[in-house]
Amino acid sequence: MADLAADAASLLEIARWDTCRVLGVSFGGMVAQEFAVTNPERVERLALACTSAGGEGGSSYPVPKLQGLPPRDRRAAELKLADSRWDERWLQAHPADRVLAERLTAAHDRPDPAAPAYQAQLEARAGHDVWDRLDAITCPALVGYGNYDGIAPAQNGTAIASRIRGAQLRGYDGGHLFLFQDPAALSEFGEFLQAPPG
């Protein structure tokens, strides 16, 4: 995770930006936290969605546990983790969620679990722990979670917000994809990130 945060810092150097505003979603939220605790002076505003701090702040669901399941069972488990309401009945009654579920399933069918990049991501995820360093973040922060998220549950978002002074905490009507499920989510995240300094 430290390497990914260092890559982000290098990108700022290339772009010749002294500071930036950061949005981190899921695994990207883990990278964003690492970047923000390592470079607090460079982050103007930090928005985190459906993510976890690791350590005593709670970890995201250990995805490798699903790899041994038969494909059909694995897909069903992935959908329930993404949104605990997602079963066949729910998806039939909620077409927008059904489209998200189909896209999620298709996306998970693509990566080769043996691919080195995928394995490296799983290892970074498993070792992620910024819990004891979150108080280094001094910029305005927004932490959002989905009320039905089984990957990065609500208590993980609550824990993150409790360690960042003045952080705003918001729960949304959705799961791990709440940014696309709750109509309020994208606009609130956008407004937060675009707010004037100060």
Image (cartoon, helix red, strand yellow):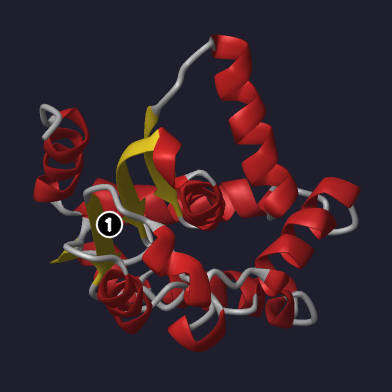
**Residue 146: x and y, percent?**
27, 67
**Residue 21: x and y, percent?**
34, 33
In the picture provided, is 99 more to the left or to the right than 52?
left
Which residue is located at x 11 percent, y 46 percent?
A: 183
Where the C terminus falls, by quadrant?
Answer: top left
Q: Is residue 96 visible?
A: no
Q: Secondary structure at mark 1?
A: helix
Residue 129, by quadrant, is bottom right
In the picture provided, is 183 more to the left or to the right than 139?
left
Q: Is residue 41 visible?
A: yes
**Residue 25: x and y, percent?**
43, 50
Where the N terminus falls, by quadrant?
Answer: bottom right
Residue 164, above or below 35? below
Please name whichever residue, 77 or 28, is drawn nearer the observer in this view of the structure. Answer: 28
Q: How many marks?
A: 1
Please name whichever residue, 178 or 12, is drawn nearer the observer in this view of the structure. Answer: 12
Amino acid type at circle 1 is: Phe
In the picture provided, is 107 more to the left or to the right than 171?
right
Residue 158, above or below 169? below
**Residue 29: x and y, percent?**
47, 54
Q: Residue furthest bottom?
A: 56
Give the labeled residue for mark 1: 178
> Alpha-carbon neighbours of circle 1 within 10 Å: few (<14), some, or many (≥20)?
many
Which residue is located at x 12 percent, y 31 percent?
A: 195
Residue 74, above or below 145? below
